[in-house]
């Protein structure tokens, strides 16, 4: 399949990163991604419980306190910090943070809007259907590779040798698939 023919790209939860979502959307493609649970410690408030105000570029807590923009780190994440003096006496501090200075820090990637758009598109019916078809097409190729072609383990060492081995195995798989299709079409 060529890039011109593609309209939807189905990816696994491990590929929901700002750069990948940005690349897919910039290429005028639609990402089909699964739901990914928040990775918050048990007993703590999740990031979505804080409201992001795009106009003022800040987060608002459940107690209507602001987490103001502080800095952008070298990984591209903007850091929003609460006022430690106001947080000291907060009734839900133990659910909010366990930092020593009693200051809540929330990070937001500079390309977070792309992830938000991908999450929004996840609810569209055609996108849902594309993700369901992923297990029938993509996952099957990897499963066949593991079961029938020995792709669970590699026999060689070094990245160049491993890439060569895997390329040959997938070429063999494609030739088998092509042979079966030619037999059916004949």
Image (cartoon, helix red, strand yellow):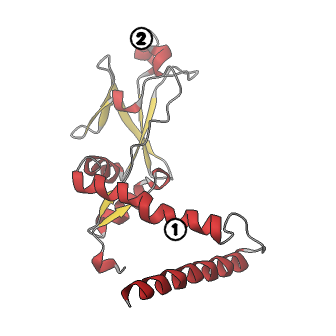
Marks 1,2: beta carbons within 8 A: no
Q: Tell me what residue is drawn at x 47 percent, y 56 percent.
A: 15
Q: Quadrant of residue 87 in the image?
A: top left
Circle 2 — which element?
Answer: loop
Q: Residue furthest bottom?
A: 186
In the rendered view of the protein, which quadrant contains the C terminus? bottom left
Percent coordinates x, y for residue 128 in the rendering: 29, 52
Q: Tell me what residue is drawn at x 46 percent, y 21 percent.
A: 96
Say which mark, if any, is on residue 61. none
The front one of 68 and 144 is 144
Q: Quadrant of residue 59 in the image?
A: top left
Describe residue 53's horizontal placement relative to residue 71 as left or right: left
Circle 1 — which element?
Answer: helix
Describe residue 125's horizontal placement relative to residue 79 as left or right: left
Residue labelled with disc 1: 141
The front one of 146 and 180 is 180
Say which mark, if any, is on residue 90. 2
151 is higher (above) or lower (below) than 172: above
**C-alpha span from label 1 to label 2:** 53 Å
The front one of 98 and 140 is 140
Q: Earlier in the sequence, mark 1 or mark 2?
A: 2
Percent coordinates x, y for residue 144 in the rendering: 57, 67
Q: Tell me what residue is drawn at x 35 percent, y 81 percent.
A: 2
Mark 1 crowd level (few <14, some 14–19, many ≥20, 10 Å Cα): some
User: Which marked residue is nearer to the observer: mark 1 or mark 2?
Assistant: 1
Percent coordinates x, y for residue 166 in the rendering: 64, 76
In the rendered view of the protein, which quadrant contains the N terminus? bottom left
179 is higher (above) or lower (below) than 151: below
């Amino acid at each position: 399949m060529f890039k011109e023919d593609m309209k939807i790209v189905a990816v696994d939860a491990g590929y929901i990163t700002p750069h990948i979502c940005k690349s897919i959307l910039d290429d005028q493609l639609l990402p089909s991604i699964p739901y990914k649970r928040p990775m918050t410690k048990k007993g703590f408030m999740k990031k979505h419980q804080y409201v992001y105000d795009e106009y003022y570029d800040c987060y608002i807590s459940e107690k209507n306190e602001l987490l103001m923009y502080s800095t952008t780190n070298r990984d591209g994440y903007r850091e929003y910090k609460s006022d430690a003096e106001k947080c000291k006496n907060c009734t839900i501090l133990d659910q909010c943070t366990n930092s020593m200075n009693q200051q809540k820090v929330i990070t937001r990637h500079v390309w977070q809007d792309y992830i938000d758009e991908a999450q929004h598109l996840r609810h569209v019916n055609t996108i849902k259907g594309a993700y369901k078809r992923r297990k029938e097409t993509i996952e099957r190729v990897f499963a066949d590779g593991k079961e029938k072609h020995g792709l669970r383990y590699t026999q060689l060492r070094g990245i160049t040798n491993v890439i060569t081995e895997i390329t040959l195995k997938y070429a063999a798989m494609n030739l088998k698939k092509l042979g079966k299709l030619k037999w059916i079409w004949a």
